[in-house]
Amino acid sequence: MPDEPPNGLIFTSQNGVLGSVRVDSLAGLPAFCVGPQTTGAATAAGYRAMDCGGDAEAVIAAILDQTHKGPLLHIRGEHGRGRIAERLTEAGIPTDECVAYRQVSEPMSDAAAKLLKGGRPVIAPLFSPRSAKLFYNALPTAAAPWVAVISPNAAEPLDDMLRRRMIVADTPDAQGMLDAIAGLLAASKQT
């Protein structure tokens, strides 16, 4: 925890919300959230939650638009790309961060590798640049899955072969991913 108690929180995942509820002094604070699911989790946890949009850029913009004075606390996972705390602090809003969880990478199972090498279409939903990179690095030779990615950033680690069978979600949230997967299902049936 930071030296000065925060007067607002930033959540970029539901897991951050889950990690925060163990700290009683945070109860009832305003919370700037990355999307509807995170906002719902924060509201259910008793925070005054605001849905800022679907990515780090939207969260930063919303906080700057609100002219919040800080200090803020970004409760996040070990892996991240947005540099939210650093960028807000540079913009004049003191922001600390606290790593509340970590996602441990697991090797691809033999069953998954076999399925990916089979002749049937496989759709892989990828929810972050890190998961896309891990998936791509573990992909068996000659595997050609259909890929739904949550954002252009999540598409970056993928090669041109995968990009030909990829849809980027229109919105970086669960509904956007469901729509992308539905698009892939329709496309895979036409081949």
Image (cartoon, rainbow, N blue to C red):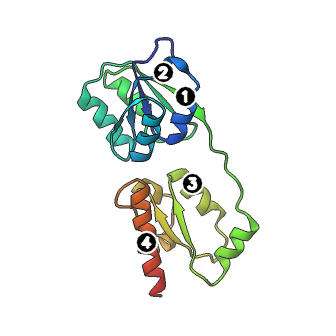
Of mark 1 and mark 4, the one earlier in the sequence is 1
Tell me the residue that label 4 is attached to. 182
- How far apart marks 3 and 1 lie (CA) works out to 26 Å
Of mark 2 and mark 3, the one earlier in the sequence is 2
Look at label 3 and name its amino acid.
Answer: Ser
Of mark 3 and mark 4, the one earlier in the sequence is 3
Mark 4 lies on a secondary structure that is helix
Tell me the residue that label 1 is attached to. 21
- How far apart marks 2 and 3 lie (CA) works out to 30 Å
Mark 2 lies on a secondary structure that is helix
Residue 136 lies in what quarter of the image?
bottom right
Crowding at dot 4, Cα within 10 Å, few <14 / some 14-19 / many 20+, comes out as some
- How far apart marks 1 and 4 lie (CA) works out to 35 Å
Of mark 2 and mark 1, the one earlier in the sequence is 1
What residue is shown at x 41% (from left), y 73% (from top)?
183
Classify residue 107 as left or right of residue 78.
right
- How far apart marks 2 and 1 lie (CA) works out to 8 Å
Quick check: marks 2 and 1 in contact, CB under 8 Å? yes
